[in-house]
Amino acid sequence: MNQNLLLDELLTAVTQSPKYRAMAPDLIRRIGAAELAKRRSFKEAVKGTKNKLHQVGGAYWDTAVDYPKALARLQNAEDEETRRQIYRDLMRLHASTRERLPILDEFYATTLAGLPPIHSVVDMACGLNPLAIPWMPLAADVVYHAYDIYGDMLVFLQEYFGLMGINGRTHHQDLLSQPPAEPADLALILKTLPCLEQAESGAAARLLGSIQARHLLISYPAQSLGGRGKGMVGNYEAQFWDLVNSAPAAAAGEPAAAAGRDWHITRFEFATELAFLVTTS
């Protein structure tokens, strides 16, 4: 069978599952093509594709989100304090943002302190992170680009942007097939690089090489989804410094220069997250 027709058939088979229906088709096709090339049968390729998609994104959702209900709650909120509680409630539904909730009040205030006004942001594999915009020290006229593979979630986020008066734009695409083209003051790459590496070896380096941002906030989880943290910070820190081809890591809060690049890097360690602020020039 023609390869494109086979990929179409695989896409149809994978998206019959509600778990993968809203995922970006270009991501499914890219992973599916690799699985078809190495599996003995079409059935095995479909199963392998689903396993990869679970690693990339599916594992981070515990339950389906009722987006219309969430939007209605925001529409009916009467004050900022109520809205912030709703944001927290919603961020609890995605594993990545749920892990950040205990440190949310300090995470952005600490990592982005001292930066010049941030007028543009690209948020890679954003999940529900744009709901944390009220905690971010951004300029009032900020343009916020949110990238993710879940189309239904991005529809909700676009409505959230409009409701809250945020100049935000959502992008339903695979970061590796079609990396962001917008230059930005800040790129948020929060707990994203390990997921990309699980999908495809070398993906993290390729993404970093494509980003056009003055500052990059890159982070890694301090524990697994199951709550195990032994050795994770050390392993991820080694991965990061290897990725940027750097000299030994800086102490917490102290800047360092990445060898071979005009990058300056500051390390931050929180209870649930390891972060690096990169200034690219």
Image (tube, helix red, strand yellow):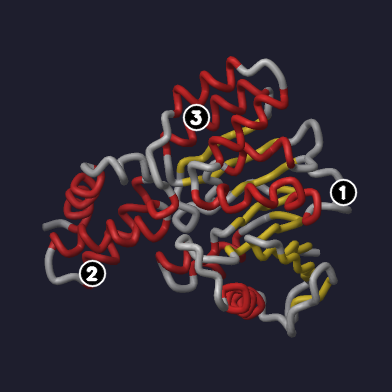
> What amino acid type is highlighted by mark number 1?
Pro
For the point 66% across and 38% down, the residue is 144
Crowd class of label 2 (few under 14; some 14 to 19; many from 20; radius 10 Å): few
Question: Could you tell me residue 261's position as x and y percent?
Answer: 74, 75
Identify the residue position indicated by label 2 in the image.
37
Q: Reading the chain from its start, which is encountered first: label 3 or label 2? A: 2
Identify the residue position indicated by label 1 in the image.
116
> What amino acid type is highlighted by mark number 2?
Ala
Circle 3 — which element? helix
> What amino acid type is highlighted by mark number 3?
Phe
**Looking at this view, is 224 or 150 the one in front?**
224
Circle 2 — which element? helix
Q: Reading the chain from its start, which is encountered first: label 2 or label 1? A: 2
Q: Reading the chain from its start, which is encountered first: label 1 or label 3? A: 1
The Cα–Cα distance between marks 2 and 1, rounded to whole angstroms, is 48 Å
> Disc 3 vs disc 2: Cβ atoms closer than 8 Å?
no
Q: Is residue 34 left or right of residue 2?
A: right
Identify the residue position indicated by label 3 in the image.
156
Look at discs 3 and 2 and give the one toward the viewer.
Answer: 3
The Cα–Cα distance between marks 3 and 2, rounded to whole angstroms, is 36 Å
Look at discs 1 and 3 and give the one toward the viewer.
Answer: 3
Rendering quarter of residue 40: bottom left
For the point 45% across and 28% down, the residue is 67
Q: Is residue 260 left or right of residue 272?
A: right
- Total numbered labels placed on residues in the image: 3
